[in-house]
Image (cartoon, grey):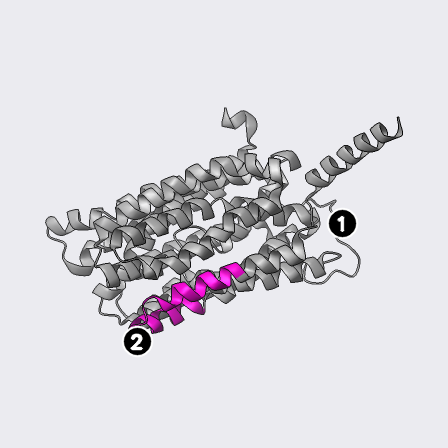
Amino acid sequence: MLSRWMHPDAGLLLVARVLRNFSYGYLVVVVGIYLDQLGLTPIEVGAVLTASAAGSAALTIGWSLLADRIGRRRSIRVLSLLMVAGGLTFVITSDPWLLALAAFAGSLSVAGTDTGTFVTVDQSMLPQVSADHRRTSTFALQNMFATLAVAVGSLAAGAVPLLARIGLQGPDAYRPLFVLFAIVGLASFSLFLRLSPAVELVPTTVRPSGSRLGLGGSSGLIGLLVALNVIDSLAGGLMVQSIVAYWFYLVWRLDASTLALLFFWMNVLSALSMLAAGAIARRIGLFNTMLLTHIPQGVFGVLMPFAPTAWLAMAFWLVRNTIGFAYFPVRLSYVMGIVPPAERSAAAGYTTVARNVAGMVTPALAGLAFSLGLLGLPFIISGLMKLSFDALSYATLRNKRPPEERIAIEEIAAIEGASGSE
């Protein structure tokens, strides 16, 4: 059924993203604990996680500037091989500098899902092989399956106690998961070998005259999106999923198996919320849906440090992400809908880079706060910044519409005008 509704290339991108998100699902649970087991301090843990975000930003900058010149398919194949190298480096070394380098180059997501270069791949390629009226549904479907994959991957983190029982102690019990991460990189590489030329930039697509760095008439709009994404990502970096898992470990002493169950149910509920994202967006519009699903991220982020019990803290985390995850496919569709096709790679690249450059600073700051005993401060600041982002988005973007919504509004206006003239 999906093969009839979805372009084959979209299907390949979906499978590749599902595989990657499966591995990200367990990495986000174990990476902080694994680094702690290796003997790294909280500041060093935060630095390694920051290196991951910095690498994602650097690779995304390169991809957005060069991918349409050297080929999108060739670019993402290289990224997949870097993923393999990063996973294997985590297996063989405990040196903080080498781990930071592997995190920088190896696409080891600290957010529990695709947040960097691979997301840029999907943002620019999917609209290329999707009709406008199916774009939001395609993004929602892909994000739903990817989130379910993260959920299943979260359960895989529960393998750590099992591996410990058969004799793998300390960090050795975590290393097989990083080997699996490298295998997923190889699988992604093989899938990307099968992509057709349809995902490349259409040669007949004309860029506006005077365009620079892939930008034309939408440069002002993309600049605004970049500024807003900086605020949102600074906030998100303080509550990136690996930091939250580490927080539960430090504050409530939750072990890997308990965290695996928590993140499993978080991702299952988040995936279910994505089922409704497309329908809600069609009813109230993409922008309104973005606000509706983003505001709870700020509210419940502020509430988490004040929870008197681990159970209530986990409940706040579940509610925050169940509603908030529906925001992501809607945001992707909205951004791709309000910029011209010739500028989509640049728009995807710059907005993703903005998120990653901003987000690469705050995990280290969260680690510093943890080392000083200020365990709740990062979450409070994050929540307040998220709410500020919502207010600024409403003030600047509420009148920006993607083409399918503009057409619908024009049709309604025409009908009302015809009725009024009778």
Q: Position of residue 379 (x, y in %)?
A: 39, 63
Q: Is residue 371 above or below residue 396?
A: below
Q: In this view of the protein, which residue sits in the foreground, 105 or 234?
A: 234
Q: Farthest residue to the right: give it.
A: 421
Q: Position of residue 75 (x, y in %)?
A: 53, 53
| Identity, as a three-letter code, of the amino acid under mark 2 | Leu
Residue 341's tag is: none
Dominant SS of magenta comes to helix
Q: How far apart are marks 2 and 1 (CA)?
A: 54 Å
Residue 206's tag is: 1
Residue depicted at 54% across the width and 33% down the height: 8
Residue depicted at 57% across the width and 32% down the height: 7
Foreground mark, 2 or 1?
2
Q: Farthest residue to the bottom: give it.
A: 372
Describe the element under mark 1 as helix, strand or loop: loop
In the image, taking residue 303 as reference, residue 5 lies left or right, namely right
Magenta stretch bounds: 361-387
Query: How many other residues sit within 10 Å of disc 1, few (<14), some (14-19) or many (≥20)?
Result: few
Query: Sequence-wise, which precedes: disc 2 or disc 1?
Result: 1
Q: Does the magenta stretch include residue 343?
A: no
**Residue labelled with disc 2:** 372
> Does residue 95 appear in the picture of this structure?
yes
Q: Position of residue 327 (x, y in %)?
A: 51, 47
| Identity, as a three-letter code, of the amino acid under mark 1 | Val
In the image, taking residue 412 as reference, residue 277 lies left or right, namely left
